[in-house]
Image: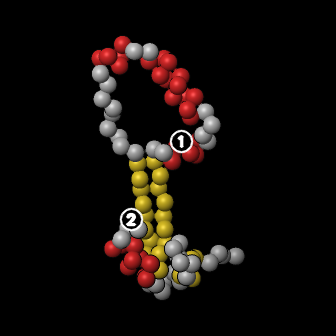
Amino acid sequence: MTSDLLCHRCGTLLEPGAGNFYIVRIEAMADPTPPTITAEQLRGDLAGQIDELIEQMRDSSERELIDQVYRRMTLHLCRQCYAHWIEHPTG
């Protein structure tokens, strides 16, 4: 049993091999640049800052925390939705 392949944007049925859709792969990652840390910050309560950060994350799931750092997804778009998306990828 196979499931239907649908456009992620409009729900149109896509037919593999018919050339009527695009595969779009998106990879997003948080800024990898290390933060700038001053000598004054190093003299501060680092253990306390780490504890505070851990407390802020306590109610978040592992998936939520990972998604804040890295996310990869694959979209299937019909020709019409792809034409719109490629010209206006942010909206």
Count of numbered marks:
2
Question: Which residue in the structure is indicated by mark 2?
Answer: 90
The quadrant in which the C terminus is found is bottom left
Residue beneath the point at 47% across and 55% down: 72
Horizontal arrangement in the rendering, residue 34 relative to residue 45 (left or right): left
Residue beneath the point at 32% across and 16% down: 40
* x and y percentages locating residue 56 in the rendered image: 55, 32
Identified by mark 1, the residue type is Leu
Query: Could you say whether the residue bearing mark 1 is in a helix, strand or loop?
Result: helix
Q: Residue furthest bottom?
A: 18
Residue beneath the point at 51% across and 28% down: 53
* x and y percentages locating residue 38 in the rendered image: 29, 21
Residue beneath the point at 47% across and 22% down: 49
3 or 45: nearer the eye? 45
The quadrant in which the N terminus is found is bottom right
Identified by mark 2, the residue type is Thr
Query: Could you say whether the residue bearing mark 2 is in a helix, strand or loop?
Result: loop
Question: CB under 8 Å between callouts 2 and 1?
Answer: no
Q: Residue furthest right?
A: 1
**17 over 30 or under it: above or below:** below
Could you say which quadrant of the image residue 88 lies in? bottom left
56 or 35: nearer the eye? 56
Horizontal arrangement in the rendering, residue 76 relative to residue 38 (left or right): right
Upstream in the sequence, badge 2 or badge 1?
1
* Residue 21 visible in rendering: no
Could you say which quadrant of the image residue 80 lies in? bottom left
Tell us which disc is closer to us: 2 or 1: 2
Rate crowding at label 1 as few (under 14), some (14 to 19) or many (20 or more) other CA atoms within 10 Å.
few
**Alpha carbons under labels 2 and 1: distance apart:** 23 Å
* x and y percentages locating residue 67 in the rendered image: 51, 48
- Name the mark on residue 65: 1
